[in-house]
């Protein structure tokens, strides 16, 4: 069975970032979601955005870059198929409760495509 692009993105994130995937799965389980269900891709990626937010709070530029570059590369490969999951579930949420200083610090480490999507919704931090 062919998996949809959103499910493939989640599978690739799980493979590339196993520790963050385990944390994301746990977060979903605590809220009575099955993290392996086919219909949870959007909520899974939204919860994965919290892992990026945690890296921003730690000021871990390497993790911020690796997360956003990985997702941006997937988005470049399938922009129409992944637009909703990357834009709404990830980009709009990566800094949803960050303070101004965290947002300004993180901005230079976030992949350009993710910055563009974030900025379209929330504006550039500053």
Image (cartoon, helix red, strand yellow):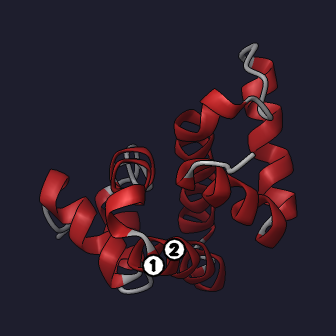
In this rendered view, identify the residue nearer to me: 50 or 32. Answer: 32
Pinpoint residue 28: horizontal percent, then vertical percent: 73, 28
Q: Are marks 1 and 2 in contact (CB under 8 Å)?
A: yes
- Image quadrant in which the N terminus is located: top right
**Left or right: where 72 falls relative to 13:** left
Question: Mark 2 sits on what residue?
Answer: 74
Residue density around tag 2, few if under 14, some if 14–19, many if 20 or more, within 10 Å:
some
> What is the number of callouts on the image?
2
* Quadrant where the C terminus is found in the figure: bottom left
Q: Quadrant of residue 40?
A: top right
**What's the distance in space between the residues labelled 1 and 2, CA to CA?**
5 Å
Mark 1 secondary-structure assignment = helix
Which residue in the rendered view is the most extreme toward the front? Answer: 1
Image coordinates of residue 75 in percent, x first then y, are: 43, 71
* Image point (40%, 57%), residue name: 81
Task: Specify whether residue 50 is in view.
Answer: no
Query: Which residue is under mark 1?
Result: 77
- Name the residue: 83% across, 66% down: 15
The residue that appears at 18% across and 64% down in the rendered structure is 119
Q: Is residue 108 above or below residue 21?
A: below
Q: Position of residue 60 (x, y in %)?
A: 63, 77
**Is label 2 in a helix, a strand or a loop?**
helix
Question: Callout 1: few (<14), some (14-19), or many (20+) C-alpha neighbours within 10 Å?
Answer: few
Q: Nearer the viewer, residue 81 or 20?
A: 81
Instruction: Mark yes or no: residue 40 visible.
Output: yes
Point 64% across, 85% down: residue: 62
């Amino acid at each position: 069975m062919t998996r949809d692009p959103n499910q493939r993105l989640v599978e690739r994130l799980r493979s590339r970032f196993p520790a963050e995937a385990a944390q994301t799965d746990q977060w979903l389980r605590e809220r009575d979601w099955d993290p392996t269900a086919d219909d949870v891709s959007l909520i899974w990626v939204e919860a994965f955005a919290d892992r990026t937010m945690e890296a921003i709070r730690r000021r871990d530029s390497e993790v911020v870059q690796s997360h956003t570059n990985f997702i941006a590369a997937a988005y470049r490969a399938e922009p129409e198929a992944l637009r909703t999951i990357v834009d709404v579930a990830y980009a709009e949420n990566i800094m949803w409760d960050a303070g101004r200083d965290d947002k300004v610090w993180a901005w230079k480490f976030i992949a350009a495509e993710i910055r563009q999507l974030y900025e379209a919704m929330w504006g550039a931090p500053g």
